Image (tube, helix red, strand yellow):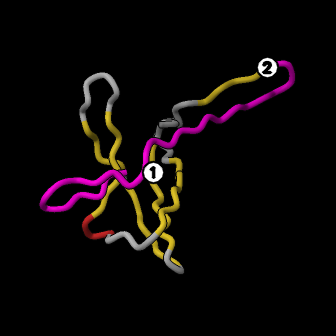
């Protein structure tokens, strides 16, 4: 996650990935894409994050292209929960 400001962006957290494993009888599958369904992932950050000046992004590890990730920030008792919505596992 990158917190952007007028002077320069600041990285507040790094990549979060997860895999979903499904077992049915003798078969098992790993799901890494979820069609058009967005999957929520949350990170917890110490301190308050200004949601009007923050966003989540994904950076392609080959091309270094930066893509926006839909996200919501909520601060409770000094801890900010950043919930990101993606249709892939990373």
Q: Which residue is drawn at 58% across and 38% down?
A: 18
Q: Which residue is nearer to you in this view: 72 or 47? A: 47
Q: Residue at x 37, y 51 (%)?
A: 1
User: Looking at the rendering, which quadrant does residue 14 occupy?
Assistant: top left
> Magenta stretch mostly in which secondary structure?
loop
Q: Which of marks 1 and 2 is nearer the N terminus?
A: 2
Question: Dot 2 lies on which element?
Answer: strand
Question: Dot 1 lies on which element?
Answer: strand
| Separation of marks 1 and 2 at Cα, in angstroms | 28 Å
Q: Which residue is nearer to you in this view: 12 or 32? A: 12
Query: Height in image: 56 above or below 25?
Result: below
* Rendering coords of residue 52 (x, y %): 27, 70
Q: Is residue 52 magenta?
A: no
Residue under circle 1?
Answer: 85
* Start-end of magenta stretch: 1-27
Query: Height in image: 15 above or below 33?
Result: below
**Which of label 1 and label 2 is nearer to you?**
1
Q: Residue at x 45, y 51 (%)?
A: 85
Q: In this view, does 3 lie to the left or right of 22?
A: left
For residue 27, which numbered disc appears in the image?
A: 2
């Amino acid at each position: 996650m990158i917190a952007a400001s007028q002077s320069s962006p600041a990285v507040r957290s790094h990549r979060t990935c997860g895999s979903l494993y499904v077992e049915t009888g003798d078969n098992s599958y790993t799901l890494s894409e979820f069609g058009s369904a967005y999957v929520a992932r949350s990170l917890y950050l110490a301190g308050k994050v200004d949601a009007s000046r923050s966003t989540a992004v994904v950076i392609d590890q080959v091309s270094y292209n930066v893509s926006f990730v839909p996200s919501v920030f909520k601060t409770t008792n000094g801890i900010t929960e950043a919930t990101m919505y993606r249709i892939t596992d990373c």
